[in-house]
Image: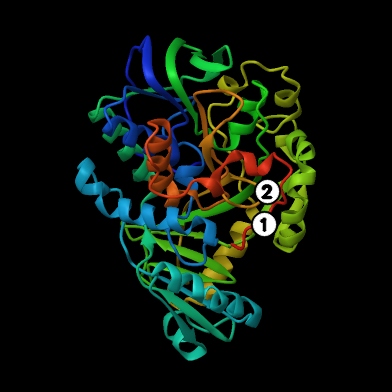
Amino acid sequence: MFPAVRSVASDETLPQSVDVVVIGGGIVGTASAYYLAKRGLSVALLEKGHVACEQSSRTWGWCRQQNRDPREMPLSLLSMSLWDGLAAEIGQDLGFRRTGLVYATDDAAMLAGWEAWGPTARAFGVETYMLTGAQAAQRIPETRRKWVGGLHSVADGKAEPAWAAPALAEGARVRGATIHQNCAVRGLDITNGRVTGVHTEQGSIRADAVLCAAGAWASTFLARHGVVFPQASVRQTALRTKPTHDVGDVVYCPDLAMTRRLDGSYTLAISGRATLELTAQGMRFAREFLPQFIKRLKAVQIGVGKSLFAGPESLPSWLGSDDRMFERQRVLDPAPNRRLVEAIMDNVKGTFPELAGIEIDHVWGAYVDCTPDAVPVASGIDAVGGLFLAAGCSGHGFGLGPGIGYLMAELISNETPSVDPTHFNLSRLVDGSTIKVGSL
């Protein structure tokens, strides 16, 4: 069961033409629509399901700079600055709070990795401190493990996944954008190598530019127009508790990742525990992803599931035999791993005695779309003029969402970008260059 999100009303009539069509109503799509509309451009935001119905509402909600790949750091700094001002700009609470993040570990190699990130923190002015084992134990009890150390990232924090993308969508509407849910985009209209509009299940829209921010569906959608985007999704599991005792805002240890929500509940998961399912798309891009799979294989299980036959990576989608697939599956809602749910609950109860009576409110699965180097794509597409892509956030797109949206608005508007977009170009993944696997 997917988490409930704040509902957003749809506009009744499709515009005949706009400056920009944004495909996808997640955090990246809504942020892009918001910052485009703020620039005075006419925008239509199109979503096959409803706003934030997939990964953007299923995330942990972390907004962090800590431990990011150096290539992402300028975008992360921009995002945190934007998060600070969004509630006042939009007039809605997105749940963003700079609560700090606390990490603890009993793995000396993991601790060394965190310590090795120190020069990056200093280079970008991130306030973070290493913790001794005793200091870590003051924040996270050693009831299951003996900590060798930890760290405290002071200025990082969290936001509410159920609120953020809907608030950005409403903010875009106030500034003139239209929002169309249950409105799948079936394809692009391309004339003389340049995008001129989109075809949807509700009709066509002429547009000077189109941004594909379709999350796990992006590669399949673009493939129909001859655009290659190496993308793979892993299935993760998380849960939300009922309101309970406060044991910290944002907490990480090898057994558990915890985010306290504003209603007093917790989002719980285990970092790195995911399933990679055999799919047609996965086989297509196996060579590109092999280095990352080797690096992370201990934390990822390989399996066969429904995604081989249904969904964005399925055989029918890659054979092009289902031209209504986006309408047939409005919401990508995979089943959670029940064994993992049990492990999460055992871990939280075993770590925090005061949570022994904690109750589950709901559980869910989610597909996290990744790139071969675990760094997002946020760029124009060379092969098709006026076509842009923002996807492949690799499990850390929620916190980056405002920054990616801001960058895409700059690129689409042909402005000088606030951050160097070179590391986010699609071309790095398809031009034969050596792929550097992210350090996250």
Image side of residue 232 versus residue 122, left or right: right
Residue type indicated by callout 1: Val
Image side of residue 148 versus residue 412, left or right: right
Observer-nearest residue: 5 or 415? 415
Up/down of 81 relative to 388, above or below: below
Q: Which residue appears at 46% of the width and 49% of the height?
A: 420
Residue at numbered disc 2: 372
Image side of residue 205 versus residue 289, left or right: left
Observer-nearest residue: 370 or 11? 370
Kindly tell me whether residue 61 is visible in this rendering: no
Q: How is the image coloured?
A: rainbow
Q: Earlier in the sequence, mark 2 or mark 1?
A: 2
Up/down of 352 relative to 49, above or below: below
Residue 102 in the image: state x and y as whole percent.
Answer: 44, 73
Residue 363 in the image: state x and y as whole percent.
Answer: 52, 50
Which residue is most to the front? 416
**Tag 2 secondary structure:** loop
State which quadrant residue 406 falls in.
top left
Give the class, few, some or many, for how many residues have Cα within 10 Å of label 2's Cα (few <14, many ≥20): many
Q: Which residue appears at 57% of the width and 76% of the height?
A: 116
Quarter of the C terminus within the rendering: bottom right
Q: Are marks 2 and 1 in contact (CB under 8 Å)?
A: yes
**Tag 1 secondary structure:** loop
Residue type indicated by callout 2: Pro
Up/down of 63 relative to 424, above or below: below
Q: Which mark is residue 437?
A: 1
Observer-nearest residue: 178 or 128? 128
